[in-house]
Image (tube, rainbow, N blue to C red):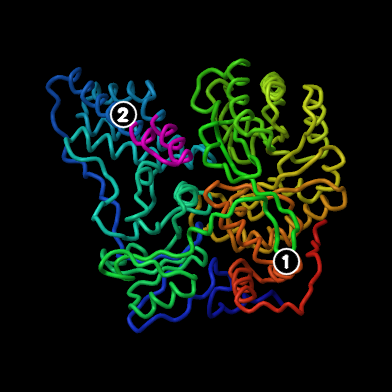
């Protein structure tokens, strides 16, 4: 007899967030993915809408019309440059400059002129040129697909300028509020005033979207992938919890006060008190010093950076756990030369004053295409020639980069560790380690982003000195869930027990080998998850510098045995939401009599 389909369940078994406590009568709870911790409340205001294209207009002088449209692009480039220069956070500035480079592409300007020559007016020519790029980026997937929102933002701004209207942007009402949007472009978040914007909420996005990364960099609570957000009336008071991923609309004063008290602080802003805008939990005490549990177990707290501009914000870090070198290569038609690379790396090493710097070799390829590589299109770029695999085709790129790193290290006192991305096999790890040592560098490691690497962590550690777990890509590959597919965003939640099981296995391999295992994905920045990662055996956590104080405080509040108990609970959970609820419940009512011992993995 054939199998019968099972009856439909009454409710989904998997939820990306905990079930929120019941709010007051008339309130409504929306659920998304919490990507930046903290709680905040205030009236909901939206990013200003984009201009609507008018009906096509006849073009009397195509040459002049083409230059008018190209001038609109130049205005956008200049404005993004000004915002980058004014941005207080180095991460925000870096993202804005990258977006400006896209708008400043001469090929894009030529495409706009060609569209005018084909009979379109300036605004429609800009729209047509960007539409071609958008289609190509979406089809490419991976890194380019992640940039589609940036293209849309650039198009909207250029069209607005060409129409003589203000560029779309963030409201500035003069009082605290919660900023809502379908998705946020880098330019939208560049000049956010934390005195006004107390939280970010979006309908789209995921744990690795620009909104998530920039919210963490700015220390703002944030929830993404929140269905139903568009239905909320502008001005509605909302309570945002970036830890649990919930948005409560219509919360009354009593509920707002209860939430603020639960978070540990109640910061009323303006004459409206809590309803006018409150925020708690996003900024932890700024205690410095090394990462330690309450009983002194060391967990090194490191910073993620992209260039020397990020170093000043990372003063409280014990070192750099991820130096992304690809920012030196992206958007260029010719690879940076040896001397240019030496200078860029030396600046970072010198600024770190003898502290550890873990530098990642070029992480680019089919999903982060570099024009000078000349790579052909691939059917699935996320599974193609990227990361260390580029060295198969262009071994001289890796040799030059390792030579530059070695020369830069010689001139400074930094403790330089080198790691490769997208390593899948022990043979790849061994070949990379040999190249690193041949360049005269003492420490070679690899990133664990591919499930095969996690499952064979013990074998990898026979070849290299350390491992660094990239939870963002590892989640994507473990759950077969594209990072840009909003419908699957809950599968990319770092609280997924299957992902934590692999982290535990890699950490266990590190313990057995006596070698360090770190986490450098966005999971490391979650103060609630950090003690669990420590309990799994992770020896270092690398994150946005803004997240360091909260993570340091979370570790210092618990002895190692408690971290191990929380880790065991999370591993035993049914799904990500269940794991988070167990941690929250245990955090609220700890049971010191329970000693689970070190959390162990089935995947060792």
Of callouts 2 and 1, the N-terminal one: 2
State left or right for residue 444 relative to residue 59: right
**In this picture, which residue range is highlighted in magenta?**
82-100
For disc 1, the neighbor class at 10 Å (few under 14, some 14 to 19, many from 20) is some
The tag on residue 317 is: none
**Residue 292 spot, x, y in % from top left:** 70, 57
Considering every residue shown, the one lying at the far bottom of the view is 25
**Residue 485 spot, x, y in % from top left:** 50, 52
Q: Which residue is mark 1?
A: 559
- Which residue is at the front of the view, 598 or 477? 598
Secondary structure mainly formed by the magenta segment: helix
The reply to whether residue 228 is visible in this rendering is no
**Residue 36 spot, x, y in % from top left:** 50, 57
State the quadrant of the N terminus. Answer: bottom right
Q: What's the residue at 21%, 29% (across, down)?
A: 122
- Which residue is at the front of the view, 577 or 189? 189
Q: CA distance from mark 2 to mark 1?
A: 51 Å
* Mark 2 or 1: the one toward you: 1
Q: Quadrant of residue 136?
A: top left
State the quadrant of the C terminus. Answer: bottom right
Q: Which residue is mark 2?
A: 78
Give the secondary structure at mark 1.
loop
């Amino acid at each position: 007899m054939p199998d019968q389909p099972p009856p439909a369940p009454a409710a989904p078994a998997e939820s990306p967030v905990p079930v929120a406590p019941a709010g007051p009568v008339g309130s409504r709870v929306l659920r998304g993915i919490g990507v930046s911790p903290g709680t905040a409340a205030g009236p909901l205001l939206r990013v200003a809408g984009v201009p609507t294209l008018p009906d096509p207009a006849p073009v009397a002088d195509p040459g002049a019309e083409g230059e008018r449209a190209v001038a609109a692009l130049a205005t956008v480039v200049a404005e993004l440059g000004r915002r980058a220069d004014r941005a207080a956070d180095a991460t925000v500035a870096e993202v804005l400059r990258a977006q400006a480079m896209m708008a400043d592409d001469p090929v894009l300007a030529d495409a706009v002129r060609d569209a005018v020559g084909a009979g379109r007016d300036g605004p429609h020519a800009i729209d047509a040129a960007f539409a071609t790029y958008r289609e190509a980026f979406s089809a490419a997937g991976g890194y380019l697909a992640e940039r589609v929102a940036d293209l849309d933002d650039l198009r909207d701004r250029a069209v607005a300028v060409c129409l003589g209207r203000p560029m779309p942007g963030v409201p500035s009402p003069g009082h605290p509020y919660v900023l809502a949007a379908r998705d946020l472009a880098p330019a939208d978040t560049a000049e956010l005033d934390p005195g006004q914007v107390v939280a970010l909420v979006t309908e789209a996005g995921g744990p690795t979207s620009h909104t998530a990364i920039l919210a963490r960099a700015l220390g703002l609570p944030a929830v993404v992938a929140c269905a139903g957000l568009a239905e909320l009336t502008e001005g509605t008071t909302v309570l945002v919890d970036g830890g649990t991923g919930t948005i409560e609309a219509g919360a009354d004063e009593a509920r707002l006060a209860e939430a603020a008290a639960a978070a540990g602080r109640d910061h009323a802003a303006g004459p409206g008190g809590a309803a006018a805008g409150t925020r708690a939990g996003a900024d932890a005490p700024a205690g410095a010093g090394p990462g330690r549990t309450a009983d002194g177990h060391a967990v090194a707290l490191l910073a993620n950076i992209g260039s020397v501009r990020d170093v000043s914000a990372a003063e409280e870090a014990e070192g750099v756990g991820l130096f992304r070198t690809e920012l030196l290569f992206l958007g260029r038609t010719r690879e940076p030369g040896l001397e240019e690379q030496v200078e860029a790396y030396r600046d970072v090493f010198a600024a770190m004053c003898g502290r550890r710097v873990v530098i990642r070799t070029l992480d680019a390829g089919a999903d982060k295409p570099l024009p000078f590589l000349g790579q052909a299109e691939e059917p699935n770029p996320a599974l193609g020639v990227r990361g260390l695999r580029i060295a198969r085709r262009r071994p001289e790129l890796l040799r030059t980069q390792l030579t530059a790193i070695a020369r830069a290290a010689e001139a400074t006192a930094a403790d330089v560790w080198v790691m490769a991305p997208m390593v899948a096999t022990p043979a790849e790890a061994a070949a990379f380690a040999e190249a690193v040592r041949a360049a005269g560098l003492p420490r070679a490691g690899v990133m664990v982003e591919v499930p095969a690497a996690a499952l064979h962590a013990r074998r990898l550690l026979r070849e290299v000195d350390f491992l660094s777990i990239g939870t963002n890509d590892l989640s994507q590959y473990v759950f077969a869930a594209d990072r840009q597919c909003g419908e699957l965003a809950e599968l990319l939640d770092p609280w997924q027990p299957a992902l934590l099981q692999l982290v535990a296995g890699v950490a266990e391999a590190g313990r057995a080998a006596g070698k360090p295992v770190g986490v450098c994905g966005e999971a490391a920045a979650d103060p609630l998850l950090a003690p669990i990662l420590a309990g799994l055996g992770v020896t270092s956590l690398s994150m946005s510098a803004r997240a360091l104080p909260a993570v340091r405080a979370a570790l210092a509040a618990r002895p190692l045995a408690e971290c191990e108990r929380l880790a065991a609970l999370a591993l035993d959970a049914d799904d990500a939401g269940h794991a988070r609820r167990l941690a929250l419940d245990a955090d609220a009512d700890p049971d010191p009599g329970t000693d689970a011992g070190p959390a162990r993995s089935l995947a060792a």
